[in-house]
Image: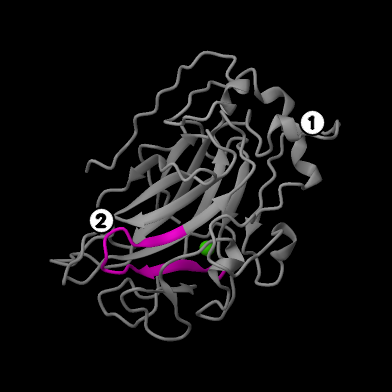
Amino acid sequence: MFFGNRSAGLCSDNSTNNSTSVFLITFGSSTNNYSNSTPSSFNFTTSHIQVINTAIQDGYFGFVNAVPNHHKVWQIGKLDYATNEKNGYMFLVNVAKEKNTVIFNSTINDLCIGLRYEFSAYLANVDIPPTGSRQKPNVRFEVRAATFQVGILKNSSTGNIPAEDYMPWRKYGVTFIASNNSVVLLIISNVASSSAGGNDLAIDNIELRGCSNNYSRLCPSEETTTSQHTSSAATTTTIGMAEHSTSQHISSSSTTTTTTTTTIDMNEPSTSQHISSSITTTTITTIGMEETTTSQYISSAVAVTTTTDMSKQ
Ligand SMILES: [Ca+2]
């Protein structure tokens, strides 16, 4: 599968180099063209409506293992962004016409305040080029504080995602420094209402990870055991290997639409080993937060100012 260049707003470190995933959603795999899994299986919600074995029209989505042939302008038969999975699914969204419609919404708890994370996904325009007047998908990755609903901590827009031969997958995302333990991660459409068709988007490998191997998904204050593990192996919660094998990682796979549900089991015993050493090498800043609870971790200089706001297209 094609690897696109990293876009601005992503971690500067090598994505394969010892980073720790908080979650990675690959959507599973099967020979069935459409997956029966639901967004709640993967701990997120969407304002779009799922279809199975029917055409994916405006405002709908499917988890499909190949681009279906319901629209002749689509890259029919193109596959997901899978590196290991056969018949892997992708999240194919015929994005609703309303601007700011939500494609992905997931709340993550127990982040480490002061640490830098990367929220990313592989995206592809489903249309075949040239697309004429058809809309190109254009989304933003947005991070909001879950606890106080104080608004946007960080966002980054993709700009228009081009239609290209062979439907290459490109990585997009945003980095942020957690100023809250709990954040809401969103992928939101920037495309304004239009009568033009298009705005059809394929999504795969949605991930939240630390930006370097100094990061753990658990906070130092939550370390309750003195683990002897010193392995640098990252602990990745891969959601979606198979439809019925995912529950072990999901503490409360709620079917409600609340955004405050605890979704990831943060108490896996194998995840605590990287914690204690992470503070000293951490560069910390705070982003637009009034809360004072972050000060306990701010012993080093405020140095990183990330100005990768790409919302100005
Ligand atoms: Ca996949």
How crowded pointer 2 is (Cα within 10 Å; few <14, some 14-19, many 20+) is rated as many
Secondary structure beneath dot 1 equals: loop
Secondary structure beneath dot 2 equals: loop
| Residue at horizontal 58 percent and vertical 21 percent from the top | 295
Vertical order, 303 against 127 (above or below): above
CA separation in Å, label 1 and label 2: 44 Å
Depth check, front residue: 58 or 66: 58
* Magenta span includes 178: no
Vertical order, 292 against 171 (above or below): above
Badge 1 is on which residue?
230
- Residue occupying the far left of the picture: 133
Tag 1–tag 2 contact (CB < 8 Å): no
Earlier sequence position, callout 1 versus callout 2: 2
Q: Locate residue 46, reporting x and y percent.
A: 45, 65
Judged by its main secondary structure, the magenta piece is loop
Q: Left or right: 243 with respect to 87?
A: right
Q: Left or right: 77 with respect to 146?
A: left
Mark 1 belongs to which amino acid?
A: Thr
Can the viewer see residue 168 in this picture? Answer: no
Instruction: In the rendered structure, find residue 162 and report the number of the disc placed on it.
Output: 2
| Residue at horizontal 52 percent and vertical 22 percent from the top | 284
